[in-house]
Image (cartoon, helix red, strand yellow):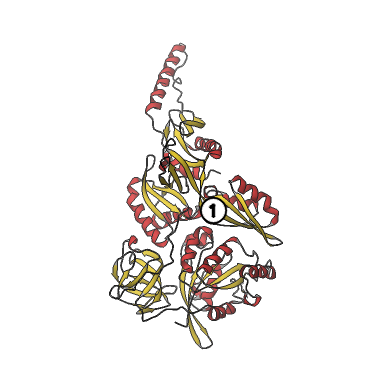
Amino acid sequence: MKNIRNFCIIAHIDHGKSTLADRMLEMTQTISERKMQDQALDDMDLERERGITIKAHAIQLDYHQDGVDYVFNLIDTPGHVDFSYEVSRAIGACEGALLLVDATQGVQAQTISNLYLALEQDLEIIPVLNKIDMPSAMVDDVAEEVLDLLGCELEEILYASGKTGEGLDGVFKAVVDRIPPPEGDPEAPLQAMIFDSLFDKYRGVIAYYRVLNGQIKKNDQIKFFNAGGEYQANEIGILKMDQMPQQVISAGNVGYVITGIKESKEVKVGDTITLRDNPCDEAIQGFEEVKPMVFAGLFPIDNDDFEDLRDALGKLQLNDASLVFQPETSVALGFGFRCGFLGMLHLEIIQERLEREFDQNVLTTVPNVGYFAYTKKGVELEINTPNDLPDPTKMDHVKEPYIRAQIITKPEFIGGIIKLCMDKRGILKNQTYLTETRLEMTFELPLAEIVFDFYDRLKTISKGYASFDYQPLDYRSSDLVKLDILLNGEPVDAFSSLIHRTKAESFGRRLCKRLKEILPKQQFRIIIQASIGAKVIARETISALRKDVTAKCYGGDISRKRKLLEKQKAGKKKMREVGNVKVPQKAFLDVLKLD
């Protein structure tokens, strides 16, 4: 055990985590030159296309130093704020972390956020300045920022380049010298924590775990402590570029287990694996349940695909424990699922993965956040969809979630950022200069206001120089109303949204205008209305398609034409009474892009 080191790489998005991991794989010859490609650990095409890491990836490296063979269990983590749950899971399986800071960008919001996650778990932090080979690298300035952040000594900071491999020997040496070996008793009853899992269509559920105490052997009868299921460990092994079967995995090490489980709900990330005949006394603590921030409905385009979509979401949930879902029905869209996501990027990624990995094309309703409504009798109701909101006559007040947002930027963009946050009902709480050219601003904002376009607008205002991170804060009373969209007097529940009263009118007008552009013309007139309760606040009309019924009348008395027009008018009236407005799927997708 004294030769094992478990560590992860944490950083802000785009600071070079995956590139550094690539060089580590090359230098330890874990991957052959023939198989080497950029972002080698990222196994989704989606990750390479977007240049981001979506999933944390675990891999074992063999390293030789001063005549001693060491085993490194490395986890490469995502950087985007929407995937911070992946980072927290990776940190739970490690004793140390490489804190990567881009020498051209400096300390950014997610750097600080991920650092705090690691410090909470008492991890040994090794600061590494990356991209020192870049012409625009500000090595001395960024080193000062890191010193202020960590309060460490200057000689503790390492300098490296993930691209060229420069300085990597020093990083490996620091991992051996500064990260403590895992503690644990190989003779104690088995106690292993599941930190990730995935579904293989041939072999079932594969669980990744870190053994804290005891050891797991091939063909052992194992038990999941919280879920309660008992299984045989058909195959166990370590995680190289491919899975490598072993006979035994002992305390301090990281591995995988295949038991032939086909039901995804039987394996829970954060659960404890123990032996059936010699169980441990208690489960491993400290793994928090994920709290979704954004909710949206996912509906199959064809209702016959409902069960396939349920299976696909179940398998995705194995691979992404932050996804939560439950069945729901919609008058307009039929049967589907109400899903919880960590943010808008997370929602986009899940949609793409459903399409690519499971051939599931889905419709998405307007995303919203979770609220709490209180009736006049004092009953608390959890509100995840606008349709859950009780009747306004019975409702006392609604509470909405607030977040604490950290924005790190250059001083010249202060005015624009404050205006953006004030427009979003934000409160400026603090402003601190980190250096002469960088300052940190702290705002309290309603979560609902940052869900759609906040991040994009922040990047535009700051010309890409602002970094953004947030943590949930609390729930506060707010004047929220339910905005309904009516087509010819019939509400379309998929377009309903909860919105602050001051913004309801402008949002309703924009929505009606957008729907007028999107909805196809029918043989009858379509009236689009936005309403709050019984009060209509915006209206647009799509005129009917008109056939020229008088085209066949060449001359003759005017009464012939009038008779035909009267007949057409009566037909249109009847059609308006019985005709249904079909909303195309494009309309639901385009409404999401309403800026």
> Residue 503: horizontal and vertical position, in percent?
55, 39
Instruction: Kindly identify the residue that appears in the image at 42 percent across and 78 percent down.
Output: 184
Q: Nearer the viewer, residue 29 or 259?
A: 259
> Residue 20: horizontal and vertical position, in percent?
56, 71
- Disc 1: CA contacts within 10 A as few (<14), some (14-19) or many (>=20): many
Point out the image quarter for the N terminus: bottom left
Q: Tally the numbered discs.
A: 1
Residue 369 visible in the current orientation: yes
- Which picture quadrant has residue 577? top left
For residue 393, above or below residue 192: above
Left or right: residue 47 versus residue 330 is right
Residue 12 visible in the current orientation: no
For residue 248, above or below residue 330: below
Left or right: residue 124 versus residue 199 is right
For residue 558, above or below residue 97: above
> Residue 485: horizontal and vertical position, in percent?
46, 36
Point out the image quarter for the C terminus: top right
- Which picture quadrant has residue 330? top left
Instruction: Kindly identify the residue that appears in the image at 68 percent across and 50 percent down.
Output: 415
Secondary structure under tag 1 reads strand
> Residue 293: horizontal and vertical position, in percent?
48, 53
Most extreme residue toward the front is 377
Query: Label 1: which residue?
Result: 403
Instruction: Kindly identify the residue that appears in the image at 41 percent across and 27 percent down.
Output: 576
Left or right: residue 427 versus residue 349 is right
Q: Amino acid at mark 1?
A: Ile
